[in-house]
Image (cartoon, helix red, strand yellow):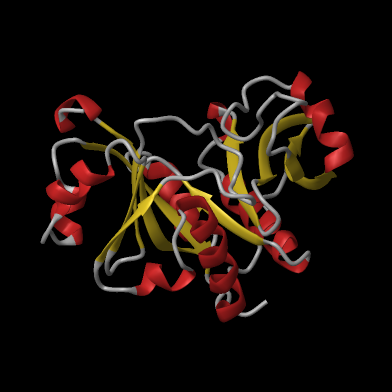
Amino acid sequence: MDKNEMMNKVFHQLALDYNCLPEDFLKDEIIFTEAKELEGRRPYPFFTPRLELITFGSGVVVNASGDIIDRAKSIFKNKSAFEIFNMPFVCGVNPYFLPNLSDRPILRHTEGFEFKFIEKSEISKLYSQKGFELALQYDVHSLHPEQLAVVVITKDTIVGVASAVSECKTLWQINVDVLPQFRGNNLATTAVSMLTNEVLKRGYVPYYSTSIDNIFSLRVAAKSGYLPSWAHCYRTRMDLLNV
């Protein structure tokens, strides 16, 4: 997979999620689309009123439910991307990362720790291991199940897990968690790097996301060879919109 193929897959999936054209994400303008449950959309809850924002650094795609789209247009008219993402009712913005395909990190395992791949059919057995809520869903009925995982083992004990969740046919989200007493040993970085390489080898696009205030997780993304690619506002204060 090269960068063009990767970005095409990302743009096409996000276009289904936000009811726009793939090329809209590269336009230096504010584009308004009505939120709809299109076939192929990632299976996340659909609620109204709804207002989401997404930017790849130039313009912004504003995805709003039909009941508030006119209000959104009046508020965002003639605004820049910077102004929109810094409005007082925008309160849930997360960065999203894609792998740097031209410069993958060299894997260096930490002495005393074993890293092992776990396939989908065996992942539910990990649910008996507690303490990995950032990496595992603990839900055998999830609409976007874990497809692949890397476990970190020392002295026959699992101390870290990285998982790849299939949210759609092309994109797999990478999640990771390490028990607090074992953090700082490069375990998360190694597990995420291994998992990323394997997901790419299987033809899927891995992506990484975390809370903007989780500095440790942001460092893992950078050390694992991920680059910031887009920002998504998934939560807004509707009461401040007067709707």
Quadrant in the picture for residue 138: top right
Q: Residue at x 39, y 67 (%)?
A: 25
- Image side of residue 87 versus residue 91, left or right: left
Q: Is residue 227 above or below residue 32?
A: below
Q: Position of residue 15 (x, y in %)?
A: 50, 60
* Most foreground residue, 242 or 7: 242
Q: Is residue 102 above or below residue 173?
A: below
Q: Farthest residue in the right direction?
A: 121
Specify whether residue 168 is in view: yes
Specify whether residue 223 is in view: no
* Most foreground residue, 188 or 3: 3
Quadrant in the picture for residue 201: bottom right
Q: Position of residue 132 (x, y in %)?
A: 62, 28
**Quarter of the picture holding the N terminus:** bottom right
- Image side of residue 99 versus residue 60, left or right: right
Q: Residue at x 24, y 29 (%)?
A: 238
* Most foreground residue, 96 or 26: 26
Q: Residue at x 81, y 35 (%)?
A: 123
* Most foreground residue, 157 or 35: 35
Q: Position of residue 233 (x, y in %)?
A: 33, 44
Quadrant in the picture for residue 214: top left
**Quarter of the picture holding the C terminus:** top left
Q: Position of residue 195 (x, y in %)?
A: 69, 54
Q: How many numbered marks have been drawn onto this rendered protein structure?
A: 0
Q: Is residue 103 above or below residue 202?
A: below
